[in-house]
Image (cartoon, coloured by chain):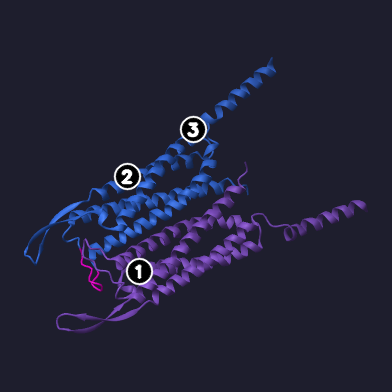
Chain colours: A purple, B blue
Amino acid sequence: MSSTEVSGSRVTEKAAAPLLAPPRNGGSAVGDLILRFLLFASCVVAVLVMVTGNQSQLIPITFPPFLVSRDAKFNHSPAFIYFVAAFSVVGIYAAITAILSFFALLKPGFYIKAVSHFVIFDVLLLGIVASATGAAGAVGYVGLKGNSNVQWRKICDLYDGFCKHIGASLAVSLFGSVVLTLLIIISVRALSKRIPK
Amino acid sequence: MSSTEVSGSRVTEKAAAPLLAPPRNGGSAVGDLILRFLLFASCVVAVLVMVTGNQSQLIPITFPPFLVSRDAKFNHSPAFIYFVAAFSVVGIYAAITAILSFFALLKPGFYIKAVSHFVIFDVLLLGIVASATGAAGAVGYVGLKGNSNVQWRKICDLYDGFCKHIGASLAVSLFGSVVLTLLIIISVRALSKRIPK
């Protein structure tokens, strides 16, 4: 009778453990979910701010002497098109992995298995995100400052609204890149911790 | 007597094991060393090719009508300066970690411990390398094709030698970025394999 009681209480303890005690790597899994959500949000914001930056401006031309309307659009520069494409892809990826990460949170053993696969794609996408930010940043910088050596004139004095959109989008994308880097570092730390000494 | 003999032969077996049997994760450690060496080599080549691309050209100007000598140098563009700085840093890092990786190969237990630290810096530097490649690539593309929307004229028809240097340097840097990505993926795989099922 007493033996049955003890064994019964042990079974209850075992079943209750995952609910009461924090699951192993629970902190990392929660951090993973939050960072993936932040990454998704920053990708959406970066793409929307970049795409909505269109601006028309009346430009005086010398011959024949009248004003023409010229647009500034993100798709006038291949670097900005690459930026929008890259952040759209990463945004979709972040949404999918955030959902998977949420399920991993519910199923404690699943997180570490999921991470070891996610982290490889995370690294590939970090490369894409960083290069897109670099490309858009470089073209944006030429637009802001110009380059007197090759006579590329600055355009931000004319298209101030467009340039503000580009700058804001770049700031958000830089934040997204940092989030993705943190995500990879957290994943690698979670993997290293699980290795027996 | 017989017991001493047996224990003696066991000791010999134990000492010989690391020399005869392939060490655990030996394949990854060798791959790590080779990739780090390739990364170092590609960084050095990318920086040297970029820096040695100077070209002087006689440009006709309309008023007063004569020829002026104009240089094309990598340090006329902030994107190319960033590129050279980033690849110099990564080259030094690759040289240091290649040496450490070589010592890790000699000491079998050390590799996995080293990897769990290296991989975090590798990820940070991948972000820098990819953004530098993107920035230099974007400015190089504007130089190659120009941008008619904002009247940035192409310069590669004039400075063909300079542009060839930029293009070659970018190709090598892209190769370096792929090598660094592979390095991270191999490290993550080595970490994942060590986790008990």
| Identity of the residue drawn at 31% across and 70% down | A77
Q: Nearer the viewer, residue B32 or B118?
A: B118
| Identity of the residue drawn at 18% across and 53% down | B161
Tell me whether marks 1 and 2 sit on the same chain.
Answer: no
Q: Which residue is mark 3?
A: B106
Q: Which residue is mark 1?
A: A80
Residue B3: quadrant of the picture? top right
Q: Which stretch appears magenta? A: B147-154
Local crowd size for mark 2, using a 10 Å CA cut-off: few (<14), some (14–19), many (≥20): many
Amino acid residing under circle 3 = Leu
Q: Which residue is mark 2?
A: B44
Q: Which mark is residue B123?
A: none
Give the number of the mark in front: 3 or 2.
2
Q: Nearer the viewer, residue A135 or A97?
A: A135
- Residue B109 x, y percent position in the rendering: 55, 36
- Residue A129 x, y percent position in the rendering: 42, 62
Local crowd size for mark 3, using a 10 Å CA cut-off: few (<14), some (14–19), many (≥20): some
Q: Label 1 near label 3: C-beta < 8 Å? A: no
